[in-house]
Image (spheres, rainbow, N blue to C red):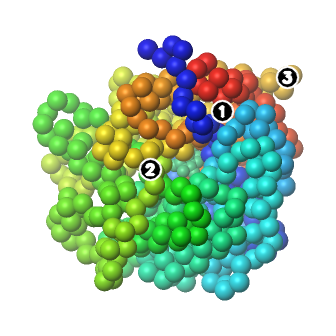
Amino acid sequence: HTEGFSFPQGFLWGGATAANQLEGAYDADGKGLSTSDMAPFIPHELRDGKDFTFDVDSVQLEEYLDGDTGVYFPKRKGVDFYNHYKEDIALFAEMGFKVFRLSIAWTRIFPTGEETVPNEAGLAFYDKVFDELLKYGIEPLVTISHYEMPVELSRKYNGWENRKMIELYLKFANTLFDRYKNKVKYWITFNEMNMILTSLYTGGGILEDRILGTKEQVAYQATHHQFVASALAVKSCKEKIPGAQIGCMICRLETYAASSKPEDALQTLKEDQMNLFYPEVQARGEYPAYMQRYFKENQIELVKEPGDDQILKDNTVDYIAFSYYMTYIGKYDPNDNSNSGMLVSQIKNPHLQVSEWGWPIDPIGLRIALNRLYDRYRMPLFIVENGLGAKDVVEEDGSVHDSYRIDYLQKHIEQMREAVQDGVELMGFTSWGPIDIISCSTSEMEKRYGFIYVDQDNSGNGTLERSRKDSFYWYKKVIESNGSEL
Ligand code: BG6
């Protein structure tokens, strides 16, 4: 159906990253320690079947801060973009990128989060990065907060559990708006806000062993604080940068009913409402009634300040950004009243193949997600993450034949074309990890998403040399043809 089709003029093709998985140089030029610098590498055999290896408790945190623990922290090293940014951006430009999504390490700007004056060396680093991007005509798309914060704020306030974070985040965001107003037009306030439910430490700097009430109570209170912070950032971004586009972001959990049983359909609807709770507040401007009911039935009491609801109402986003990796199954369980917002599908879909990490591969689900979000919000959408984490093999001549990655992206972009023809307003597509970076969930190096290979292993050995995989040449052609040649 898509022969001869090309995407709208000005479609933003590119790639997406996060500072803590990319930059390294964790203590350079005055940078403070961030929560992600505390994510240890745990070898596969010791993982106990857990998908996430980054969460730490208070005791571990203090131990890791002490220094000599013998533990390896891959996100401290990243892939050293801090010292390779020129070379990396030149490679993005060679592929024809129109946009590059990156985040700012909060701790480069405010090392503990509580300084009143920002760290000039940190600000200067991002100036250099933006200038380099703009030199090639690549628009920066900046995520203000991507799964990290100063570790001091986690220790002192238990992160976003505390309302104080709103003021500290705004100081950070305003510093960025003032400094980069002539360089950055596209912004995202928080990465995957819904994931705080499953990853309190990563999403909110919250140490679970410090929680007095229930985990869910704290997750939603922290979410409320992030909603208010996000809305106030939207407000000042618009005041400070005329023409800026600022969006919210979710990890889209597209969910199918396990059967045609009405109970399963209803459960699926509820799961969906939990996922759409975030754009309901950030794009529509109010807490939906179904959440009020959920809070009541689950004894969750949010502390709000007078004026919060008005702030949310008055400062909605310009677009909805989302990540899409896989789909999920909704099944009614009479013993479980929670709508969990889980990350990895607990029920297997027999119709789908999975990645080496067990993530179901479902291109059609992307078309469904795009249609569903657009039908509901009638607002521009931006796919800011999608891709395949896989192990790569380097041939003797240095080449990497990653046909599996090309196949994954090709099929997803095909479904994007269908969705655009369905009428969906889509601003762009940034594939996750255009250059190999440290995995968010497992802190591994071998879970690679890149078009650009980086020579480094799980323990941090390697030359860090960059090279082009087969997918590099393929993506270049996709961009060149504005998506008409896949
Ligand atoms: C998203 C995150 O959830 O998924 C990224 O925003 C992350 O930070 C990506 O890297 C892929 O997850 P992983 O664990 O394979 O790196």
Q: Looking at the image, do the residues carrying marks 3 and 2 touch, with CB atoms under 8 Å apart?
A: no
At 47% from the left and 29% from the top, the residue drawn is 416
Q: Please give the residue where the numbered disc 1 appears in the rendered image.
A: 391
- The kind of residue on which mark 2 rests is Ile
Residue 57's disc is: none
Question: Where does the N terminus fall, quadrant-wise?
Answer: top left
State the image coordinates of residue 446 (x, y, percent, origin top left). 68, 40
Pointer 3: residues within 10 angstroms few (<14), some, or many (20+)?
A: few
**Is residue 106 positioned above or below 461 on the image?**
below
* Disc 1/disc 3 C-alpha distance (Å): 16 Å
State the image coordinates of residue 283 (x, y, percent, origin top left). 37, 57
Mark nearer the viewer, 2 or 1 = 2
At 48% from the left and 77% from the top, the residue drawn is 166
Residue 320's disc is: 2
- Furthest toward the left, the residue is 262
Q: Please give the residue where the numbered disc 3 appears in the rendered image.
A: 396
Q: Looking at the image, do the residues carrying marks 1 and 3 touch, with CB atoms under 8 Å apart?
A: no
Pointer 1: residues within 10 angstroms few (<14), some, or many (20+)?
A: some
**Is residue 428 positioned above or below 292 on the image?**
above
Q: Quadrant of residue 279?
A: bottom left
Depth check: give the residue in front, 338 or 278.
Answer: 278
* Disc 3/disc 2 C-alpha distance (Å): 44 Å
